[in-house]
Amino acid sequence: MTSIIFIFLLTGLVSGFIAGLLGVGGGIIIVPVTYFILLNLDYSSEIVMHVAVASSLGVICFTSISSIRSHIKLKNTNFIIVKKWAIGIIIGSIVGSFAASSISGQNLVILFVILAFLISLNMLFQQNPIIVSKDIPSSNIINFVISCSIGFLSAIIGIGGGSFSVPTLTMFSKKIHEAVGTSAVFGFLIAFPGTLTFIYTGLNINELPIYSLGYVNIIIVFFISITSIFTAGIGAKVSSNIDKLVLRKIFAIFLLLTCASLIIEHFII
């Protein structure tokens, strides 16, 4: 038990720092770590991915607050975009969480691997952002579709949204620091309604780990959060003074290895 707690604390340190630094959301680390731990504790493969995704969103509720405060102080947050995309993000998160709760554990693993693989390829090979417009669309409908898609894809695999919102914002000519700072707010708008939805959908599920509230495990959320809330702010501060290109490539390689290990663990061994 001590070693498991240590792993969760370490996961919080790393995921919080990465979330604040790159704006990719700590969930991309939290989900696979939690998945492997629960699987090795002999919990059913049909519920471990759901618990991992739900608990990751629970952690991001706390991590994102720390990151938001730091980015606001650094004046990296564009509240005009937040206002236009907030409703779509929230609705997408709720729908995505319901969707994740309704599919099998195996399909949820496949979905996570596919999306994480695409995210890693984007981080690994994209040197400069593709610019499609000088600003976000003026159409409310287009903004809703974009934001709802970001919320949906993020919630369904338990990440904070930065993996989708940062490249999207840079496509609309937003500076990387502004994109990361704005995405920090989206992280909370995805995580909070997503967490509540996973609590509701998991209330009648049997054989969940102890101290679970629906699919959200309080122990996991607590131990990862108590370290990640500190490193998220540190990562946000460091982000303004560091070249992210090399770090993005290193993280992309780590993510590819994570995808490979998930495939081997779930479908080969």
Image (cartoon, helix red, strand yellow):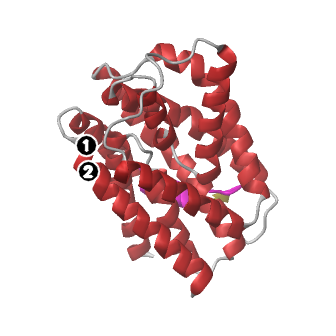
Which residue occupies the extreme left position in the image? Answer: 241
Image height of 265 relative to 6, above or below: below
Q: Which residues are magenta?
A: 213-225
Residue 206, percent from left and from top: 78, 68
Q: At 35% across and 62% down in the image, what residue appears?
A: 253
**Disc number placed over residue 244 in the picture, else none:** 1
Q: Nearer the viewer, residue 243 or 64?
A: 243
Considering every residue shown, the one lying at the far right of the view is 204
Q: Is residue 8 left or right of residue 208?
A: left
The x and y percentages for residue 179 are 39, 29
Which residue is drawn at the image coordinates 71% and 55% (left, top)? Answer: 214
Question: In the rendered image, which residue does mark 2 sit on?
Answer: 247
Within 10 Å of disc 2 (Cα), the crowding (few <14, some 14-19, many 20+) is: some
Q: Looking at the image, do the residues carrying marks 2 and 1 touch, with CB atoms under 8 Å apart?
A: yes
* Mark 2: secondary structure: helix
Q: Left or right of 62: which side holds 154?
A: right
